[in-house]
Image: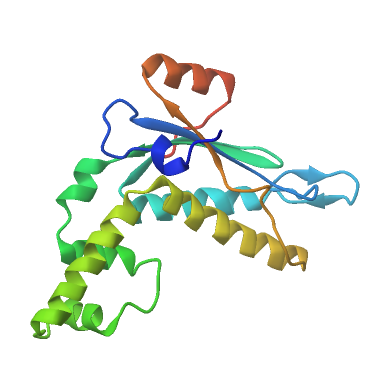
C-alpha cells in the first residue's frame, strides 16, 4: 500500500533535511532540447524552469539546493528552511503569499494596509497567516507552483490543452550527506545561484 506524501515529507523533522524531486512530461512532450522528428528546438524552456525556481525560492521557505533539466523531465533537490519560515511575522507571511497569489480576503488586504480590524477579522487574518505559513514551507505547494506555471506556458506555446506532466511529482527523502552525494553523482545536478 502506498504512503501519502504528507507522511513522507515532514518539514519539522531534522532527519530528512533534503528531498530529491522529479517531474516527467507526458505525451512525448519536450521540456527542453531538440525534437528531431519535428525539428523544433525547446531549449529556451530551460530558462523558464530556472527563472521560476529562483522566483519560488525567494517566496517560499524552501531552498533550491540543486537542479538538472533534461529533455522530458527535471530533477531538483530541495531543502525546507523551517527556521526561516518560522521566523516570519504574520505580516511577512501574508506579504510572501501575495507575491504569487492574487485576491487575499478583504480582512487580509485591510491588515496589510494597516487599517484597524475587528476581533473576528483579526482572527481570520491569523488563521490565514498560519495556513499560508504551512504552505510556504510545503514541498507539495512549491512543486505545484512550479509545475502548473511550466505546464501553462508549454501548453500555450504548443497550442494544446491537457496534461503536460505525467502526474504529481515524485520525491525521495535524502536522509544523510551520503544520500545527498549519491543523488548528486548519479544525476548531473547544477547548484542554483
Where is residue 90, by image quadrant?
A: bottom left
Please tell me which residue lies in front, 80 or 42: 80
Number of numbered markers: 0
Q: Is residue 80 left or right of residue 161?
A: left
**Is residue 136 placed above or below 162 in the rendered structure?**
above
Q: Is residue 9 left or right of residue 166?
A: left
Residue farthest along the front direction in this orientation: 1
Location of residue 39 in the rendering, given as x and y in whole percent from the top left corner: 87, 50
What residue is at 31 percent from the left and 40 percent from the top?
11
Q: Is residue 35 left or right of residue 178?
A: right
Please tell me which residue lies in front, 76 or 131: 131
Location of residue 28 in the rendering, given as x and y in whole percent from the top left corner: 80, 47
What residue is at 30 percent from the left and 25 percent from the top?
15
Q: Quadrant of the C terminus?
A: top left
What residue is at 15 percent from the left and 73 percent from the top?
123
**Is residue 122 placed above or below 61 in the rendered structure?**
below
What colour-coding does the image apply?
rainbow
Residue farthest along the top direction in this orientation: 178
Location of residue 125 in the rendering, given as x and y in whole percent from the top left corner: 20, 73
Location of residue 45 in the rendering, given as x and y in whole percent from the top left corner: 64, 52
What residue is at 66 percent from the left and 37 percent from the top?
70
Q: Quadrant of the N terminus?
A: top right
Amino acid at each position: 500500500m502506498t504512503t501519502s506524501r504528507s507522511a513522507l515529507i515532514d518539514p519539522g523533522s531534522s532527519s530528512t533535511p533534503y528531498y530529491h524531486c522529479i517531474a516527467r512530461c507526458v505525451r512525448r512532450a519536450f521540456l527542453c532540447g531538440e525534437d528531431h522528428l519535428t525539428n523544433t528546438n525547446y531549449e529556451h524552456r530551460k530558462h523558464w524552469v530556472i527563472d521560476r525556481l529562483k522566483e519560488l525560492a525567494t517566496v517560499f521557505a524552501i531552498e533550491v539546493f540543486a537542479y538538472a533539466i533534461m529533455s522530458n523531465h527535471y530533477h531538483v533537490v530541495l531543502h525546507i528552511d523551517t527556521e526561516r519560515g518560522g521566523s516570519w511575522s504574520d505580516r511577512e507571511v501574508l506579504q510572501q503569499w501575495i507575491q504569487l497569489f492574487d485576491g487575499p480576503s478583504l480582512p487580509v488586504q485591510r491588515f496589510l494596509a494597516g487599517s484597524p480590524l475587528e476581533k473576528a477579522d483579526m482572527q481570520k487574518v491569523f488563521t490565514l497567516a498560519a495556513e499560508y505559513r504551512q504552505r510556504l514551507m510545503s514541498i507539495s505547494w512549491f512543486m505545484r507552483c512550479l509545475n502548473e506555471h511550466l505546464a501553462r506556458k508549454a501548453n500555450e506555446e504548443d497550442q494544446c490543452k491537457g496534461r503536460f506532466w505525467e502526474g504529481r511529482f515524485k520525491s525521495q527523502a535524502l536522509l544523510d550527506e551520503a544520500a545527498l552525494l549519491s543523488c548528486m553523482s548519479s544525476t548531473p545536478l547544477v547548484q542554483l545561484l
